[in-house]
């Protein structure tokens, strides 16, 4: 009888496991050391953290402090009632569906949403529906864009670390309070109860960066309690279990807490203190093998694009998914989206940072309103290099155009190609590795415009260009993919400045052949005093070409490369054209190439010389197409016959006979 009961219990256990595996297959789920999507296919998570939104962090806003500290300082400036209104606008604008759509279009397949426990449960034992409404919205946006939402308890009751980002101004009170721990467990239970059947809920990141010295077992036990409460309501979703000591240490964390779980760790240069290499994660690989559960990099970032590429390559080579930190910040170069900071808001941050007086209530209100308006995606600057370094497989293999550059024309020196150090550019200081410890190793000394090793500063004289390259060193280079519009002889000049160094540059083509030989740049005795230096002339053939600007001797600041030809100097605009189809039964296209932006006049006449159509159109640099639909000026269809089309660019007139045959 006892043996029969044992066999029955075993069959029941197998049935439950089998049923759970079928159910889990409909969601993001774990099988052994691998993660699978809700389509049943193996997946490498490539995500983005939405930090700074529900858990405001000072450095993302141009200041300092914990979420509570930031709120208190806003109240001090504009009062409690206005602060509530401010946060409503802040939460509405920081992340909207447009942001999620954009992330999905770039190629991210998941987002990690940090939340403050007070967003969901401001008082122990009660819940705020407004907070859950925010999660509901994000989940619906993610569902429509087919990307996973991973919820992250970024601030637990009492604070899990005592750090500012964990709202720990009073220390890590989570660990010495049973009530705080049970509160955190309850919140996860409520989350699981509400979202257990949501297909695009990726899972639950249980406890961000816990810090408890020699407390690995306690960190495990609290997350085990969270797991037990979650599984009471939700057998479907993946659990992301964090290591101790800022999600880095896994002593005392094993064995696995659940069949459907992932070990979450974080990776920053100030945590690793080494170059990006296999040795920095081997202890994690060993732990994965020991516990037979996957790894997930829950946070990494705040470094150069080169570091981003190296880290994501390392993770993906080892079948480790990742969530980058962070999506949007004010005035950033290290994230994909940078919100502009205006002068009024900067009065507030100067006051908070101890560099200015207290602004008036009216000024503070205006500055904060400007700040939340600038948080809208439509008002932000997209950092293409950051996105490419994370998602473009070609980033470390070849240089790609950063902007469409035409010759003849002007090239901002800062608009060099996208790509890794040694491909699109070469700079000696390009990454914050800290192999020997110490503080921040600056890669872009100007902290402006782009996130590469190239040092870019905001120019005090922005008439010609807002930015310039500074701190140049001998042996560095910049590459530019250019579209040469016409076979011609081109004259090159460069705008530079130098306080005391006699620098020099040279230009090469893709085949490493000299285009412009070494040319000395003048000493201007002031880095803010810019002069133009002729470099020489070169024959260039029409087509997509590459120019490498090599710094032979460093020390100069570089702003603008100017390239002209006899044709462009003489004012030539349209230099080639074609009309097709001709004859036609409906529409004729006029394809033409232009050396510059300009307005053109389009006129169509009948055989009697009567004007039947006129238009003023804008010609762009490069290829253009003007479409004529054989309608007259009053919107009526023209009859069959021969017509005469003219295009006047102000310098010359193109004349073509066109025929309509229906």
Image (cartoon, rainbow, N blue to C red):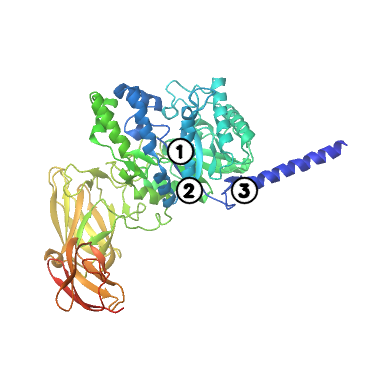
**Going from the N terminus, do you reach mark 1 or mark 3 first?**
3
The percent position of residue 302, horizontal first and vertical second, equals 39, 40
Count of marks overlaid on the render = 3
Between 186 and 178, the one nearer to me in the picture:
186
Q: What is the C-alpha distance between the residues marked 1 and 2?
A: 37 Å
Q: Is 474 on the left or on the right of 127, as rendered?
A: left
Q: Is residue 355 visible?
A: no
* Quarter of the image with the C terminus in it: bottom left
Q: Residue at x 36, y 42 (%)?
A: 334
**Going from the N terminus, do you reach mark 2 or mark 3 first?**
3
Label 3 neighbour load within 10 Å: few <14, some 14-19, many 20+:
some
Label 2 neighbour load within 10 Å: few <14, some 14-19, many 20+:
few
The percent position of residue 212, horizontal first and vertical second, equals 52, 26
As helix, strand or loop, the secondary structure at mark 2 comes to helix
Q: What is the C-alpha distance between the residues marked 2 and 3?
A: 20 Å
Tag 2 near tag 3, CB within 8 Å: no
Tag 1 near tag 3, CB within 8 Å: no
Q: In the figure, residue 274 lies in which quadrant?
A: top left
* Quarter of the image with the N terminus in it: top right
Q: In the figure, residue 19 lies in which quadrant?
A: top right
> Which labelled disc corresponds to residue 25?
3
The percent position of residue 244, horizontal first and vertical second, equals 53, 31
As helix, strand or loop, the secondary structure at mark 3 comes to loop
Circle nearer the viewer, 2 or 3: 2
Circle nearer the viewer, 1 or 3: 3
Q: Is residue 576 above or below residue 29?
A: below
Residue occupied by mark 2: 144
> Which labelled disc corresponds to residue 272?
1
The percent position of residue 538, horizontal first and vertical second, equals 19, 66
């Amino acid at each position: 009888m006892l043996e029969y009961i044992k066999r029955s219990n075993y069959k029941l256990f197998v049935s439950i496991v089998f049923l759970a595996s079928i159910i889990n297959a409909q969601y993001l789920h774990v099988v052994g050391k691998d993660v699978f999507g809700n389509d049943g296919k193996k997946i490498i998570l490539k995500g983005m953290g939405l930090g700074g939104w529900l858990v405001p962090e000072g450095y993302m806003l141009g200041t300092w402090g914990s979420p509570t500290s930031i709120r208190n300082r806003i109240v001090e400036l504009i009062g409690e009632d206005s602060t509530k209104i401010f946060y409503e606008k802040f939460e509405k604008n920081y992340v909207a569906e447009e942001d999620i759509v954009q992330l999905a279009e770039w190629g991210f397949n998941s987002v990690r949403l940090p939340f403050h426990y007070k967003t969901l449960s401001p008082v122990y034992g009660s819940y705020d529906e407004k907070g859950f409404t925010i999660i509901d919205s994000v989940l619906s946006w993610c569902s429509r864009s087919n990307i996973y939402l991973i919820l992250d308890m970024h601030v637990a009751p009492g604070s899990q670390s005592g750090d500012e980002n964990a709202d720990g101004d009073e220390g890590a009170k989570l660990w010495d309070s049973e009530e705080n721990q049970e509160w955190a467990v309850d919140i996860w239970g409520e989350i699981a109860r509400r979202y257990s059947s949501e297909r695009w809920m990726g899972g639950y990141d249980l406890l961000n960066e816990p810090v408890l010295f020699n407390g690995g077992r306690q960190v495990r036990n609290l997350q085990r309690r969270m797991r037990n409460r979650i599984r009471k309501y939700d057998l479907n979703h993946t659990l992301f279990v964090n290591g101790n000591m800022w999600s880095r240490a896994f002593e005392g964390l094993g064995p696995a807490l659940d069949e459907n779980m992932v070990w979450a760790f974080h990776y920053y240069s100030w945590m690793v203190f080494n170059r990006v290499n296999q040795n920095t994660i081997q202890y994690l690989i060993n732990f994965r093998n020991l516990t037979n559960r996957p790894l997930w990099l829950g946070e990494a970032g705040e470094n150069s694009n080169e570091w981003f590429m190296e880290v994501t390559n390392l993770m993906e080579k080892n079948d480790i998914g990742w969530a980058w930190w962070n999506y949007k910040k004010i005035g950033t170069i290290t994230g994909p989206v940078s919100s502009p900071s205006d002068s009024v808001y900067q009065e507030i941050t100067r006051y908070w940072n101890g560099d200015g007086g207290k602004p008036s209530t009216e000024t503070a209100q205006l500055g904060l309103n400007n700040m939340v308006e600038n948080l809208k995606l439509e008002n932000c600057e997209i950092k293409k290099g950051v996105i490419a370094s994370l998602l473009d497989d070609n980033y470390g293999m070849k240089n790609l155009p950063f902007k469409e550059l035409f010759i003849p024309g002007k090239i901002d020196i800062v608009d060099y190609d996208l790509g890794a150090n040694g491909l699109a550019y070469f700079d000696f200081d390009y990454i914050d590795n800290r192999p020997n410890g110490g503080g921040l190793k600056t890669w872009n000394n100007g902290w402006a415009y782009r996130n590469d090793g190239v040092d870019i500063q905001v120019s005090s004289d922005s008439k010609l260009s807002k930015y310039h390259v500074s701190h140049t060193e001998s042996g560095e280079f910049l590459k530019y993919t250019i579209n040469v519009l016409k076979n011609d002889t081109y004259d090159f000049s460069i705008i530079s400045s130098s306080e005391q160094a006699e620098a020099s540059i040279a230009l090469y083509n893709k085949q490493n052949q000299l285009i412009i030989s070494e040319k000395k740049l003048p000493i201007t005795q002031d880095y803010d005093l810019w002069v133009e230096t002729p470099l020489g002339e070169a024959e260039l053939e029409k087509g997509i070409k590459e120019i490498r600007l090599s710094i032979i001797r460093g020390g100069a600041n570089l702003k603008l490369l100017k390239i002209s030809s006899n044709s462009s100097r003489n004012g030539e605009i349209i230099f080639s054209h074609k009309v097709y189809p001709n004859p036609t039964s409906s529409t004729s296209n006029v394809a033409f190439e232009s050396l510059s932006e300009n307005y053109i006049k389009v006129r169509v006449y009948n055989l009697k010389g009567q004007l039947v159509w006129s238009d003023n159109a804008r010609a762009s640099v490069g290829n253009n197409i003007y479409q004529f639909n054989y309608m007259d000026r009053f919107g009526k269809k023209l009859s069959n016959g021969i017509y005469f089309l003219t295009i006047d660019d102000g310098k010359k007139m193109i004349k073509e006979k066109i025929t309509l045959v229906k």
